[in-house]
Image (spheres, coloured by chain):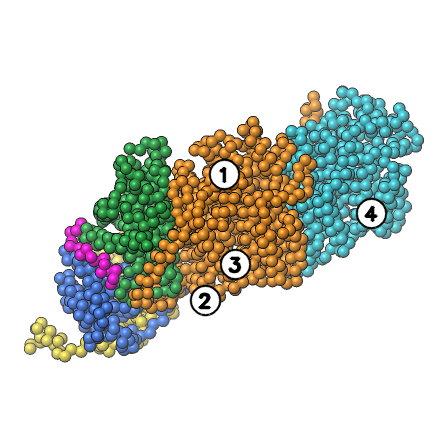
């Protein structure tokens, strides 16, 4: 991705953004259990300025921790669109990379960045907290260098992503039969 | 001359028997005639029937109290006669007889003669109350009335034994103590039925709420006024206010009881009948304070109450469920009910003020409390009726067509009476003059005695 | 086998001639019965204590060209469990519905219809339950190939090198 | 002209000291949980990061609410005397400060509910109920102080503590005021309105970037108002620097307490405040009436 | 300027005229009403104090006169402001709402005639007469509202009748004892009245009329039903103004008969009688606040808030020192304006949506922004928050209570003011903010004719909030005329013994803070406008956004703490049914009996009589 030219304000803003990343408390798969240890005393995510936030409106990073079924993907896309602009996505584990052990399942997706732009992947069938912190630092470096532009890509080729999403998930008229 | 007042209506009644219900149209002339006759009569004039001197023969006394009450009663009859619609088929005869007997009742100066007229009025009243097939109510009224009449007769007998004469003036002149113990009680019971005292007013709701407009209109106004006048005449002029403290207690009980039982009524006519019982009770308790001011206040209140009841009963009997079709009657109804309660712009307020003033004057604090308490309850149910009639909640369309409009002359008279109420509200001295004269006539019994006994 | 369960089995024998009994556990017995007898066996079992239909599922024997429909009944009184199974033909997969015995069966039958394509008379509510916009074969049938479907619907990652092949070699499935 | 400088001084102290102290408190909480914790300037970064993002808005009432909130709290802060630095010498009446603070609260509440998310309405309803809880004991204990010193101006209250601190003169009142101070700050035991787990951070559920930053500013200023009042009234005469020291001490004390206590349920908050603190406050008022002051 | 008695007559005959005009055309009738009331306001504005007029004389020895006292002028100007603005509102509102517009207009005029008479009457009897006329006028309008407004009308009249009849009883006992009824003469006689009991009896019974009318504790139950169900625009007059008649009588009974001089001081300068009245005010504040928090019908909610504010006024007036009395009077002005504003905005909302239930509405701000602004400023003033005038009166009452050291009353006033934040916020969140219901998508803003009075009231509150001098001048003139030491203020700084504050600096500081926030808001990147249904829903797709609105049981967790509260309405209901059942028994026993029963009763009477006589 070409490195867009950033003016002085954006450079400062990127410095600040890297220092205080707020993650969204939205865990989709088996990787969610890795987050508490990285927050608590041993690995302490907060020293990097990272902390959990309850709503997508306030969050910067969206963790996709583990396999994504079609239905969960629909909610992930909806939450992703609700997050305010410079937003980053980190894909945990192999299930987001290439479908992992569910590569041949009829319900789970095989490649996450086909649907939403992913800035960073962490390999491993559930990476350990050390790998997590390594990834966070890596992401902070990318943000400081201005390379983490997943959200810009999403905005620029928005309809490519939309077609991919329609291709896999199809248009569903939300009409739950149980609460008429 | 004053005997003509009794004779003429009777004469016409008998003359026009064959014409049956054509008499309705002659009534106004009879009433007008008697009114003119009264106005022409000189006030201080005692008429000895058959030339017999006072203590022996029957005397018709026309002092200023009886003069004014005659005017009031005849005006009522004249107004009623102007509304032939409400007089049923053959009641006009009774109407005439009633007129004659009431004139007699007011005029007579003789105790036994008053019993006779009392009986005639009650008989006429029984027949009247049997209109619209209300036989059971009329039967009850008959029983009570006759018992009362019997006691009244006993009272006259004892007074004759005690004082040796039947003439009111004579009795009042030589009253002695042991005689006084018995006679007032008997006469009080005799009159209690007519003046609707507490336990004996059982007949009132059945008779008044019979559905016909005429019975309550006459009974509640004309007959009640004359009975109250008679009560005043006997108990104050003759007995010089001896028995009145018992009457006071009974009056208060009647007020409270009548108001309470009116609260629950779901039929307008019954509620109004209870209200007239209450007003009568109130009148009696005010009278029994036995002073010139209390008498004026009492009669002034009675006059207001009668005018209001006249309008209320006629409307209540002839209105369907709401005033949608006939707005003017509605306005008349509301004005009358507001004066009944005592809102400031209307007549009732003046009389209530007067009562309160006199009650406070002779340090009597229970009456105002009961009066105010009764008015609060009266406000509750009268205004509830007002709202129910003005804002009927679910009137079916076809029901709306059915309520026919009252005929024009009924509306006209009702409006006139309603306007009278408002005028009295602003300038009360017309009613006040009447009330003062009646009160003065009743209280200075010495002038009455000298006037009747004259030469002796 | 518990005493009470053995009596029930004895009565069942009288009811159904062709009856295969497999005793799985001290409290659990499997019965295979011909498909036309299932309804009265089930109502019989429900009659004496086995009122809880814990699961209604199916197995796809593609070789015998049969669907095996399995009812697992459980009794709250003595904790005994009956596994009643019948075999129906795979082509015209049609069977009678047990909704009138157990209302919950409505959802099980709907699921079976979605994942196996079995039709149940008496249960008209055959809408899709779990899958969204499903277009190909019912997925739990043996002749449905999930990998091929996943490749077609959820595009895979194009690797410059065939990384999967290398992984298999490392793991020793294939000899490099 | 002097007032403008003084007001600017008050606001800047509020901004800088407030944010640093918040960073310090996060450090203390981290240390209690045996982890490193963010640097002390972390809150500055958070505020400016939030302000620099481009978020979403729900219409004019949403923006107006936030502006009214921040404006109200800034106005309240201007009236609070920081030690001897008093922006408006004669006019800092305590009732004004408490009720001007309500403008900020109402503005925030109106803006958040204006976003249309029921979570924020629940959060605001809880905040107002909690306010009903802690406001009454606080006002009684403070009015006992005012009644004793016969003045309602905060700076005079501070100056009239010649012989000893009001905290020592009226210990009960001081304790009650501190407990309701915890409620006002919205620290842990009383942070039911912002409960992240239950109602997705309550009123702040729809606050995206810039609005979140403005609200954090408002939070820092409101902390400064609340603790400033407490220090002025209860902790004796202090010039500007001793005021800041006392402020930090109280703030650290509050963080220590709040870092170890779980969250109350909302009924428990009102019940808690209207049992013991209210009783103590009435007792204190009685003592003041009877003149039993140490 | 025509004298007051002519003004009253103009109103009475005007009502007949307006009845006929509205029969012809509603709008013209309403305009006629407005012009009349506005002219009356103009006349009252430049009435000079002390101008007396002779009227009629009912009881001999007593001359019923009108006298323009500063207190009367103050109250009447507030009432006329409210009535003229509401009648301007009615010009548009009458097109659709009341079932009988002609009667509505006529009775409004009768009521205002009564009101003017009440405020200028110089003796107890004239006050009673015009009081009853006002009750008559307002009573006939109430049943035009919703379905159980008929019951409400009866309850309203009975309660005010109880109060006014106790008042009448006191008037006559004074008349009987002294023979005079003018206020100043009565107070002179009361001063050298030996028996303490008589003084207590007089002041309490006269105050009872005020208690009944302004909905203080024992007689407060009628407020909820009447305000809740009266026709919407009329409940603005009812609560904004009619309740003030009650406060007027309370003001008279507490200040014109100077209770401080009459009775010994019980607690720091406040006599025992005032103390009891203050406690009645306290209880009604508590009842008003805690019951208002529970209501789901927005009009009944604000009705309960009028109970609470009536309590405030009584507490203000009861504390007999200059600041407290000034606070009470100022609060009369504030509550009249605020209640009128809030009820007008509710009338606009009901005019458009048709329901008064809070949980059936939501998100109306996007469709009716101006109504929202009026409601917002109204509740800010009602809750007593600084920029608006509501705060000044509450501040004065707090100061007065503090100087007197009455801590329990102070606590209750705090509970009242903080509680008012809670219950004013419930309709704000339930009706105006939150999700817009589907059925209200095409609701339009109310027509400008209805908006103008609302906005005039808003500007009035804000103006007085910043520059309270005009109202304070009035209050100072009142306090001078009543012999209480007036409060001192200069320009916009109000001084009291406890300290002073300046409304202007508070407002400017608030503006400065607002500007700073605005600057910050503009510097940083603009937010993207997102429409109402794009919410954080925990990632879930919602089908029906009407349900995504939190309004039913808004403070359920708080209400659960006092669910089993004693209800006085049930108590009075039982009392009434007791009377009815007693009536029933009597009816059965005496009136529906067979003739033999009558004979039995006659014999009983005879026995009693004979037994009594011997």
Q: Colour of chain B?
A: cyan
**Tag 2 secondary structure:** loop
Mark 2 or 3, closer to the camera? 3
As measured in the structure, the alpha-carbon distance from the residue carrying label 4 to the one carrying label 2 is 70 Å
Mark 4 or 1, closer to the camera? 1
Q: Are marks 4 and 1 on the same chain?
A: no
Q: Residue at x 43, y 62 (%)?
A: E365
Disc 1 marks which residue? E484
As measured in the structure, the alpha-carbon distance from the residue carrying label 2 to the one carrying label 3 is 26 Å
Q: Residue at x 38, y 69 (%)?
A: C124
Disc with the residue nearer the chain's start (1 vs 2): 2
**Tag 1 secondary structure:** loop
Chain ID for label 3?
Answer: E
Q: Which chain is yellow?
A: C
Chain ID for label 4?
Answer: B
Q: Is residue D34 magenta?
A: yes
Q: Which residues are magenta?
A: D31-49
Q: Residue at x 28, y 72 (%)?
A: C116
Q: Colour of chain D?
A: green
Disc 4 marks which residue? B92
Mark 2: few, some, or many residues within 10 Å (few <14, many ≥20)? few
Q: Are marks 1 and 3 on the same chain?
A: yes
Q: Is residue B217 magenta?
A: no
In percent of width and height, residue E265 lies at 47, 31
User: In the current view of this chain or complex, which residue is farthest to the left?
Assistant: C176
């Amino acid at each position: 991705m070409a490195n867009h030219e950033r003016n002085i304000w954006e450079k400062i803003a990127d410095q600040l953004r890297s220092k205080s990343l707020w993650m969204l408390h939205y865990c989709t798969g088996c990787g969610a259990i890795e987050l508490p240890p990285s927050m608590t005393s041993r690995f302490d995510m907060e020293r990097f300025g990272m902390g959990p936030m309850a709503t997508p409106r306030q969050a910067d990073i969206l963790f996709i921790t583990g396999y994504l079924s079609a239905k969960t993907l629909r909610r992930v896309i909806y939450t992703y669109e609700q997050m305010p602009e410079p937003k980053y996505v980190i894909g945990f584990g192999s299930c987001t990379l290439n479908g992992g052990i569910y590569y041949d399942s009829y319900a789970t997706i095989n490649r996450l960045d086909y649907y939403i732009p992913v800035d960073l992947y962490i390999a491993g069938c559930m990476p350990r907290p050390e790998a997590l912190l390594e990834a966070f630092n890596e992401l902070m470096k990318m943000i400081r260098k201005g390379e983490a532009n997943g959200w810009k890509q999403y905005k620029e080729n928005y309809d490519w992503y939309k077609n991919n999403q329609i291709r896999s998930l199809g248009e569903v008229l939300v009409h739950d039969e149980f609460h008429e | 001359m004053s005997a003509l007042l009794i004779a003429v209506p009777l004469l016409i009644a008998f003359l026009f028997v064959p014409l049956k219900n054509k008499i309705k149209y002659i009534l106004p002339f009879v009433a007008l005639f008697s009114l003119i006759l009264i106005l022409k009569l000189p006030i201080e004039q005692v008429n000895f029937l058959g030339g017999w001197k006072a203590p022996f023969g029957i005397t018709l006394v026309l002092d200023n109290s009886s003069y004014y009450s005659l005017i009031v009663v005849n005006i009522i009859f004249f107004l009623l006669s102007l509304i032939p619609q409400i007089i049923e088929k053959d009641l006009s005869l009774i109407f005439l007889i009633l007129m004659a007997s009431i004139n007699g009742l007011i005029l007579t100066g003789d105790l036994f003669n008053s019993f006779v007229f009392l009986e005639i009025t009650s008989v006429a009243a029984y027949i009247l109350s049997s209109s619209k097939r209300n036989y059971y109510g009329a039967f009850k009224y008959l029983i009570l009335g006759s018992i009362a009449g019997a006691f009244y007769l006993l009272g006259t007998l004892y007074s004759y034994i005690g004082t040796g004469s039947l003439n009111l003036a004579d009795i009042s002149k030589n009253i002695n103590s042991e005689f006084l113990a018995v006679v007032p009680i008997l006469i009080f019971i005799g009159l209690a039925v007519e003046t609707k005292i507490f336990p004996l007013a059982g007949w009132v709701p059945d008779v008044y709420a019979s559905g016909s407009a005429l019975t309550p209109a006459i009974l509640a106004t004309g007959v009640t006024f004359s009975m109250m006048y008679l009560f005043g005449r006997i108990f104050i002029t003759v007995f010089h206010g001896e028995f009145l403290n018992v009457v006071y207690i009974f009056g208060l009980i009647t007020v409270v009881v009548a108001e309470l039982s009116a609260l629950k009524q779901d039929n307008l006519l019954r509620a109004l009948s209870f209200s007239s019982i209450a007003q009568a009770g109130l009148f009696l308790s005010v009278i029994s304070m036995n002073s010139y001011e209390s008498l004026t206040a009492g009669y002034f209140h009675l006059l207001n109450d009668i005018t209001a009841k006249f309008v209320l009963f006629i409307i209540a009997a002839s209105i369907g469920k709401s005033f949608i079709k006939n707005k003017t009657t509605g306005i008349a109804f509301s004005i009358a009910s507001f004066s009944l309660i005592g809102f400031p712009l209307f007549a009732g307020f003046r009389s209530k003020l007067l009562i309160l003033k006199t009650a406070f004057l002779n340090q009597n604090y229970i009456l105002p409390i009961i009066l105010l308490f009764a008015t609060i309850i009266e406000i509750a149910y009268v205004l509830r009726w007002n709202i129910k009639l003005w804002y009927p909640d679910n009137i079916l369309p076809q029901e709306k067509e059915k309520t026919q409009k009252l005929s024009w002359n009924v509306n006209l008279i009702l409006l006139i009476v309603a306007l009278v109420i408002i005028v009295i509200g602003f300038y009360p001295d017309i009613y006040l003059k009447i009330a003062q004269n009646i009160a003065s006539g009743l209280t200075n019994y010495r002038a009455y005695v000298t006037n009747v006994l004259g030469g002796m | 086998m518990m005493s009470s369960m053995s009596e029930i089995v004895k009565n069942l024998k009288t009811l159904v001639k062709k009856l295969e009994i497999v005793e799985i556990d001290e409290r659990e017995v499997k019965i295979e019965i011909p498909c036309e007898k299932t309804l009265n066996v089930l109502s019989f079992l429900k009659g004496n204590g086995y009122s809880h239909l814990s699961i209604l599922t199916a197995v796809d024997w593609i070789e015998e060209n049969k669907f095996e429909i399995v009812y697992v009944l459980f009794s709250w009184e003595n904790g005994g469990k009956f596994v009643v199974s019948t075999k129906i033909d795979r082509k015209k997969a049609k069977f009678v519905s047990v909704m009138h015995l157990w209302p919950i069966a409505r959802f099980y039958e709907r699921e079976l219809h979605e994942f196996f394509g079995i039709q149940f008379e008496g249960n008209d509510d055959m809408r899709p339950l779990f899958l969204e916009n499903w277009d190909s074969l019912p997925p739990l049938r043996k002749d449905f190939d999930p990998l091929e479907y996943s490749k077609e619907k959820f595009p895979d990652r194009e690797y410059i090198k065939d990384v999967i092949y290398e992984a298999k070699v490392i793991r020793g499935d294939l000899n490099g | 002209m002097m007032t403008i400088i003084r007001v600017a001084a008050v606001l800047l102290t509020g901004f800088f000291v407030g944010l640093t102290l918040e960073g310090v408190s996060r450090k203390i909480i981290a240390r209690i949980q045996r982890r490193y914790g963010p640097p002390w300037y972390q809150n500055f970064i958070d505020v400016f990061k939030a302000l620099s993002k481009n978020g979403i808005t729900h219409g004019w009432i949403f923006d107006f609410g936030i502006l009214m909130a921040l404006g109200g709290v800034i106005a309240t802060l201007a009236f609070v005397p920081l030690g001897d630095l008093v922006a408006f010498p004669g006019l800092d009446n305590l009732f004004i400060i408490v009720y001007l603070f309500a403008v900020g609260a109402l503005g925030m509440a109106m803006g958040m509910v204006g976003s249309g998310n029921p979570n924020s309405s629940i959060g605001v309803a809880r905040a107002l109920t909690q306010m009903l809880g802690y406001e009454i004991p606080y006002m009684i204990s403070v009015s006992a102080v005012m009644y004793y010193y016969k003045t309602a101006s905060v700076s005079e209250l501070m100056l009239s503590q010649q012989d000893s601190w009001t905290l020592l003169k009226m210990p009960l009142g001081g304790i009650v005021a501190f407990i309701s101070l915890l409620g006002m700050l919205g620290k842990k035991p009383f942070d039911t309105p912002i409960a992240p787990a239950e109602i997705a951070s309550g009123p702040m559920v729809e606050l995206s970037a810039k609005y979140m930053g403005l609200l954090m500013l408002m939070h820092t200023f409101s902390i400064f108002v609340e603790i400033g009042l407490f220090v002025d009234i209860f902790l004796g005469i202090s010039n500007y620097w001793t005021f800041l020291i006392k402020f930090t001490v109280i703030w650290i004390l509050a963080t220590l307490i709040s870092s170890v206590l779980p969250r109350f349920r909302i009924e428990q908050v009102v019940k808690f405040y209207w049992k013991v603190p209210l009783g103590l406050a009435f007792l204190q008022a009685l003592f003041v009436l009877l003149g039993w002051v140490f | 300027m025509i004298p007051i008695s002519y003004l009253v007559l103009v109103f009475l005959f005007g009502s007949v005229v307006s009845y006929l005009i509205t029969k012809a055309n509603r709008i013209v009738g309403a305009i006629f009403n407005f012009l009349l009331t506005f002219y009356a306001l103009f006349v009252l504005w430049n009435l000079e104090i002390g101008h007396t007029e002779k009227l009629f004389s009912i009881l001999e020895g007593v001359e019923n006169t009108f006298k323009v006292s500063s207190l009367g002028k103050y109250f009447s100007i507030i009432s006329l402001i409210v009535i003229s603005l509401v009648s301007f509102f009615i010009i548009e509102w009458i097109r659709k709402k009341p079932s009988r517009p002609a009667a509505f207009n006529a009775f409004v005029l009768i009521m205002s005639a009564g009101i003017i008479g009440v405020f200028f009457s110089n003796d107890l009897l004239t006050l009673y007469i015009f009081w009853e006329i006002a009750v008559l006028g307002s009573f006939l309008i109430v049943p035009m509202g919703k379905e159980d407004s008929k019951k409400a009308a009866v309850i309203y009249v009975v309660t005010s009748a109880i109060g006014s009849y106790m008042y009448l009883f006191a008037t006559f006992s004074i008349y009987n004892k002294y023979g005079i009824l003018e206020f100043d003469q009565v107070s002179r006689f009361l001063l050298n009245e030996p028996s303490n009991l008589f003084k207590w009896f007089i002041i309490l019974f006269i105050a009872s009329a005020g208690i009944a009318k302004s909905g203080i504790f024992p007689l407060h139950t009628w407020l909820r039903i009447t305000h809740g169900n009266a026709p919407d625009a009329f409940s603005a007059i009812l609560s904004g103004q009619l309740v003030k008649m009650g406060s007027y009588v309370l003001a008279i009974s507490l200040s014109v008969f100077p209770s401080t001089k009459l009775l010994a001081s019980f607690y720091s300068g406040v006599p025992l009688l005032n103390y009891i009245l203050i406690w009645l005010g306290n209880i009604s504040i508590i009842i008003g606040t805690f019951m208002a928090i529970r209501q789901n019908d927005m009009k009944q909610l604000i009705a309960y808030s009028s109970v609470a504010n009536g309590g405030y006024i009584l507490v203000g007036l009861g504390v007999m020192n200059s600041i407290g009395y000034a606070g009470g009077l100022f609060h009369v002005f504030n509550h009249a304006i605020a209640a009128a504003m809030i009820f007008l905005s509710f009338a606009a909302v009901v005019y458009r949506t048709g329901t008064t239930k809070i949980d059936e509405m939501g998100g109306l701000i996007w469709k009716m922004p101006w109504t929202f602004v009026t409601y917002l400023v109204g509740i800010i003033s009602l809750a007593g928050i600084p920029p608006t005038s509501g705060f000044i009166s509450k501040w004065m009452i707090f100061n007065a209570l503090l100087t007197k050291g009455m801590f329990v009353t102070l606590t209750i006033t705090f509970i009242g003011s903080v509680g008012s934040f809670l219950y004013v916020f419930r309709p704000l969140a339930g009706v105006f903010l939150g999700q817009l219901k589907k059925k209200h998508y095409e609701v339009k803003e109310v027509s400008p004719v209805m908006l103008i009075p609302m906005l005039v009231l808003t500007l009035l509150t804000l103006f007085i909030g910043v520059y309270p001098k005009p109202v304070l001048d009035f209050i100072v003139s009142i306090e001078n005329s009543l012999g209480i030491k007036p409060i001192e203020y200069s320009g916009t700084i109000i001084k009291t013994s406890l300290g002073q504050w300046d409304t202007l600096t508070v407002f400017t500081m608030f503006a400065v803070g607002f500007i700073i926030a605005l600057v910050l808001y503009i510097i940083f990147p603009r937010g993207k406008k997102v429409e109402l249904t794009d919410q954080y829903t925990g990632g879930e797709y919602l089908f029906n956004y009407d349900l995504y609105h939190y309004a039913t049981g808004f403070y359920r967790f708080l209400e659960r703490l006092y669910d089993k509260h004693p209800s006085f309405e049930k108590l009075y209901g039982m009392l009434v049914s007791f009377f009815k059942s007693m009536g029933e028994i009597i009816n059965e026993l005496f009136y529906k009996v067979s003739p033999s029963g009558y004979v039995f009763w006659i014999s009983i009477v005879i026995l009693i009589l004979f037994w009594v006589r011997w």
